[in-house]
Image: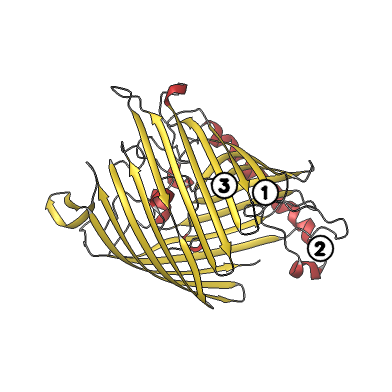
Amino acid sequence: MGVPGLERSLFSVVFVAFWWMLLHSAIVFADEPASSKVSSAAPDATTSFQQESDAASPPPAPKWQYSGFVDAGYLLDFNHPANHLFRDRSTTFKVDELDLNMAQAGVRKLASANSRWGMELAIQAGKDSENFGFSPTAPSVCGSDWLRHFGLADVSYLAPVGKGLTLQAGLFNSFIGYDALYAKDNFTYTRPWGGDYTPYLMFGLNVSYAFSKKIAVTTFVINDYDHLAHPNRVPSVGGQLAYLPTDHVTFKETLLYGPHQSNTALEFWRFFSDTTTEWKRDRLTMAFEYQIGTEKVEAPGNSRALWMSAQLPLHRIVHGPWSVTVRPEVAWDRDGRWTGSVQLIKAATGTLEYKLAYRKTTTITRLEYRIDDSRGKDGGFFRGAEVSPGVIALTPTQHLLIFGLIFGFDSQ
């Protein structure tokens, strides 16, 4: 059985475009001056606005970038559950054992005015690749066992429209959420609850345009809220407004609307909003994120499900390679549609980080403590030995002491 509908078509496009670009790159590299291979660099379109072209400066030569990393961690759980599980989590869900949480290797080429086609391809493995991207209430896509090993697989094109209209198709980073899938890209080793239950990746199409250095707009069509879930064949739609009122403040509002049940009638569509504000200056970064999602559930009574979460991370570079982060957060799954459990979760995380950059490598060491408190009809965390075959008692509070080590390479 193949990957149905939209997924099959988009992966065909990505596969063909990827091989075309590999063949085309031989010509690009042959014509590129040796000096430009070292000095040229294209801007990262995923994290910055499209810059206005400078007529006095020639556009940079296209550049292929290669990267990879390994991420290992040990989560010491003072509850010592027999099943070694951090309950209701999709990342860093194993405790009391040393795990390879993620390993990834990838290649990318950014689209630019000088070379309008771009692509990203990343392959991944590890514990964190086993559970994320799935839904607790919907079936999985066919082929999900191998699709989960793709971290990125997309092609992009920078169209010569105004300041540059960027089109992207395939599997790309999500527009929802402050935190990324990979711990190396975040301030803390473990992700917040709002991160684990919103998309880390999206599968579909997106179009983005920067009206100025302060305002950018993106629209997208994706296969589902969770890219490895397949509740129906109707895509979801959404968009994002990114606004930089000052050089130190970034505001983003992202909306998503679409069906996440087998019944695709409009009354059962899920609406989701993610609002983030980040203030960054010198050695201090502070952010606030608020999420709210709701949908009417096709079940007796047709009740309306509700999800809300918020976090307030504060990151401070203390001196040189040393930094600290604190992150209070709260998440409320009133009806159990997101986590699979009816619960109100309050959590706090503190992280001490040492980051060492050497040539093209980066080594990150983190020591982290977090406390989670889950209350509600289905709330709680696993504790101790089995009380009966296959059954482990629950307790409302969990304390974790976490050791993380990440080693990465990037050709850029």
Mark 3 residue type: Lys
Q: Secondary structure at mark 3?
A: strand
Crowding at dot 2, Cα within 10 Å, few <14 / some 14-19 / many 20+, comes out as: few
Crowding at dot 3, Cα within 10 Å, few <14 / some 14-19 / many 20+, comes out as: many
Q: Secondary structure at mark 1?
A: helix
Q: CA distance from mark 1 to mark 3?
A: 35 Å
Residue placed under numbered mark 1 in the picture: 19
Mark 2 residue type: Glu
Mark 1 residue type: Trp
Residue 300, image quadrant: top left
Q: Is residue 179 visible?
A: no
Residue placed under numbered mark 2 in the picture: 32
Q: CA distance from mark 1 to mark 2?
A: 20 Å
Label 1 or label 2, whichever comes before in sequence order: 1
Residue placed under numbered mark 3 in the picture: 252
Residue 144, image quadrant: top left
Instruction: Give x and y (percent) for residue 335.
Output: 31, 36
The residue positioned 65% from the left and 46% from the top of the image is 155
Instruction: Give x and y (percent) for residue 306.
Output: 37, 36
Instruction: Give x and y (percent) for residue 95.
Output: 29, 61
* Eye-nearest disc, 2 or 3: 3
Q: Nearer the viewer, residue 325 or 70?
A: 325
Q: Residue furthest right?
A: 56
Q: Nearer the viewer, residue 172 or 381?
A: 381
Label 2 or label 3, whichever comes before in sequence order: 2
Label 1 or label 3, whichever comes before in sequence order: 1
